[in-house]
Amino acid sequence: MLDASRSAMTDQDFRPYLSGVAAGSVSRHKGNRSLVVVQEETDWAGLLMKVRDHQDKAAFAALFRHFAPRVKAFLMKSGAGASLAEECAQDVMATLWQKAHLFDPARASVSTWVYTIARNRRIDALRRARRAEPEDLDWGPEPEPDQAEALEAQQETERLGQALASLPLPQRTLIERAFYGDLSHSEIAAETGLPLGTIKSRIRLALDKLRQRMS
Amino acid sequence: MGYAAGQLPEAFSLVVATHVSLCDECRAQLASFDAVGGALIEETDEIAMAEGALAASLARIETLDRKSQPAPRRSAGVFPAPLAEYVGGDLSAVRWRRVGGGVRQAILPTGKDATARLLYIPAGTAVPDHGHRGLELTLVLQGAFSDETDRFGRGDVEIADEDLEHTPVAMAGQDCICLAATDAPLKFRGLIPRLAQPLLRI
């Protein structure tokens, strides 16, 4: 939706447009599209391609405003203090720029990619352990990504988000704890007082449900 | 899923990453777990960044840009890239130690909660009969082995737990090289391997 004419907008122009989304308030700019529409239509992959091909700082700024506060929240839920989370979130966004040429919009949405970068940064920062990464595929990203595939990857993330939101609360909470909490299944067991077997089967059940709702 | 959420001990992560490098099906499954993480990032409440955070990030990028862009990681040898990074090279870089019966091993440097080792089993040779106190993941990198349950070739992973007691035998034809990770010492049935266990750290 952010077409060429929009990408020419300055940093300032993006501010009212996207910060409304960030703050979750639509009241300040009535008459604009509703919050949901803005979120769904923003072509994050397209913005990232502009960063990759043209080192487009305005496109980067738009990505930053959307993703950096989310990454910071993710890291803080994982147990990082505010200042560490702030610094790591800046790092994650810098990595997004640096590795833009490795992003393949046909394989993953930008949110998924941001998640993997943030998770790896969290492991570096909180656990100080190495985490082996699979080797990159033989075929790299296409220079001209297929728009339809890219759109599908982003829509899949949105559908997954809706499916997550519609899960029963206990299952949703467990998935969040498992992904955010930096807790192993046995640590969740210790914290919630539920037996380990129950936790494992609830997580499996929740993932199965997600899969059903996606198909 | 534990791998996607970043919670596995380092040694298990190494086996998963190496396996995923060889198995497209698991790569696709991993991508679907990562997508759950992506959806959670999208759904999460936001926490405002500090004043000037964007400028700070852009400044970081300036310093990064002067370094070379990271190249895709790929390996042409026996070891996929994630394993080659731990070993510091391919097969020829491994510093093997004999553990008896022609079997050789090399312990890889990982976190303490689980250990990872490379095993070299000459074609036709058996690893002593053993059971498991915890979880053992064994990934075949070259050749093949078979045990009471199945035959495993390059890229295959055998997942063994307390319930499995097995005698893996390297198939004839080619020496078998495996990457194995365990979170607890093995239980050998024979007396001699049991005595040798603490010395060999297996």
Image (cartoon, coloured by chain):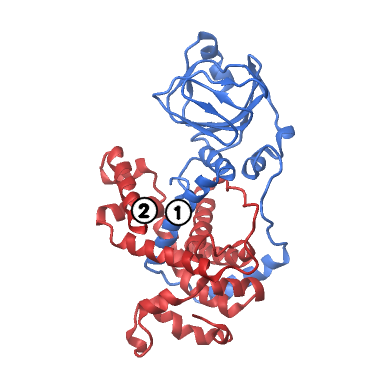
Q: Quadrant of the C terminus of chain B?
A: top right
Left or right: A86 in relation to B39? right
- Mark identifier at residue A211: 2
Q: Are marks 1 and 2 in contact (CB under 8 Å)?
A: yes
Q: What's the chain of the residue with tag 2?
A: A
Residue density around tag 1, few if under 14, some if 14–19, many if 20 or more, within 10 Å: some
Q: Is residue A203 above or below residue B184?
A: below
At x 51% / y 87%, what residue is drawn?
A13
Chain B, which colour? blue
Which secondary structure, mark 2? helix
Q: Is residue A197 above or below residue B40?
A: above
Query: Amino acid under label 2?
Result: Arg
Query: Amino acid under label 1?
Result: Ser
Residue to which mark 1 is pinned: B32
At x 57% / y 80%, what residue is drawn?
A58
Residue farthest to the top, as pictured: B191
Q: Which residue is nearer to you in this view: A53 or B190? A: A53
Residue farthest to the right, as pictured: B92
Left or right: A127 in relation to A32? right
Q: Position of residue A5 (x, y in %)?
A: 56, 87
Q: Position of residue B49 (x, y in %)?
A: 47, 71
Q: Which residue is nearer to you in this view: A108 or A30? A: A108
At x 52% / y 67%, what residue is drawn?
A150
Chain ID for red: A
Q: What's the chain of the residue with tag 1?
A: B
Q: Position of residue B86 (x, y in %)?
A: 64, 40
Which secondary structure, mark 1? helix
